Amino acid sequence: MTISRRLLLGAAATLPLAAPALAAFPEQPVRVVVPWNPGGLADILMRALGPGMGRLLGQPVVIENRAGANGAVGTQVVARSPADGHTLILGNAETHVINPLIYPKLTYNPATEFTPVTTFASGPFVLITRPGLGAETLEAFLAMVRRQPGKITFASWGIGSTSHLAMEALIKQAKLEMLHVPFTGAAPAATALIAGQVDCMFLNAGPAEAAAKDGKSKILGVGSRTRIPQLPNTPTMVELGLPVDAANWFGLLGPAGLPAPVAARIAAVVGDALKADQVQEVFRAQAALPVTQTPAEMQSFLAVDRERWGGVVKDLDIRLE
């Protein structure tokens, strides 16, 4: 009886802290910083999700692009923002897992300076070649690269990005020599590929499918363990004998100290906004899979992802100043 009374008193003592935090949120528009250029997959998905979130929250959701340093510039802005739920970061494996592994002088600590809220999407990459390259299969592409060591170029949306590391993993497995051409975002990298300025890249499946519809660009393989509905006839890299794990996730995080009731409410709002037909349509067009997690589930997911990418970065020995 005494123990139950103490538990009840302890639970009641938390209510004055939690209730005002939730009652006061949101008091103003919610800003979501997208730390990449407009037009990339992260930007497209967030702009599809934002209006529905705004209606459910009763305040507009404002998207702000802050590109630079593989997402580090915009991420740092949010780390220094008030932890009241009105400023969030659109994070992914690059901002919250890979950057601290490759940038020794990173100005934020993703493990301690952020509160996980929820993931909302995941999606595989595909290996795509520029128009006119002349390689119709992965086998033909690998043979071409081996005939011209160091001459075939590949694009990425930044040094140390998931697109960069996926290609480096392929290069290592297949014992290739290629030239890396980094860009400041997925959209300019894809534009360069379609224009024939670079030879190939790992690109998000949705934009790659659109780029290959005219038959000029060629998708050689999917970087997931199973085939995807948008490209049912395209084999995976695993099927082709090169088990390259090429995919990314997207989610929302707030600054450290974000009240748990606020984080939980935002996660619930994201989950409800994902159900809208127009949001589902955009996600399907981009070959992105809707995903919902509680803040606690996202925290556990991040720990697993850090271990996975940590092994890749260690194997490749990538360090940037």
Image: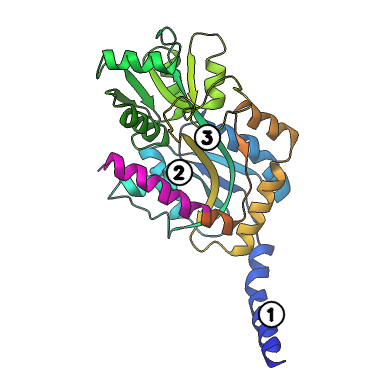
- Residue 75 shows in this picture: no
Marks 2, 1: nearer the viewer? 2
Q: Residues within 10 Å of mark 2 (few under 14, many from 20)?
A: some
Indicate the position of residue 192 as horizontal and vertical percent values: 41, 18
| Gap in angstroms between the C-alphas marked 3 and 2 | 18 Å
Looking at the picture, which amino acid does disc 3 mark?
Answer: Arg
Within-10-Å neighbours for mark 1: few <14, some 14–19, many 20+: few
Identified at 66% across, 47% down, the residue is 270
Measure how far apart labels 1 and 3 are at the Cα level. Answer: 48 Å
Q: Are marks 2 and 1 in contact (CB under 8 Å)?
A: no
Q: Could you say whether the residue bearing mark 3 is in a helix, strand or loop?
A: loop
Task: Say which residue label 3 marks.
Answer: 225
Q: Residues within 10 Å of mark 3 (few under 14, many from 20)?
A: some
Calculate the distance from the C-alpha at mark 2 to the C-alpha at mark 1. 38 Å
Q: Is residue 214 left or right of residue 316?
A: right
Quadrant of the snapshot with the C terminus: top left
Is residue 317 one of those drawn in magenta? yes
Query: Residue type at mark 2?
Result: Ala
Residue 3 against residue 105 in the figure, above or below: below
Residue in the image at 70% along x and 86% along y = 4
- Judging depth in this view, the residue of 58 and 48 nearest the camera is 48
Q: Nearer the viewer, mark 3 or mark 2?
A: 3
Q: Residue at x 42, y 36 (%)?
A: 162
Q: Is residue 133 above or below residue 68?
A: above
Amino acid type of disc 1? Ala
Region rendered in magenta: 301-321
- Residue 163 percent across, percent down from the top left: 41, 32
Query: Mark 3 near mark 2, Cβ–Cβ under 8 Å?
Result: no
Q: Nearer the viewer, residue 143 or 290?
A: 143
* Residue 12 image label: 1
Residue 65 on the magenta segment: no
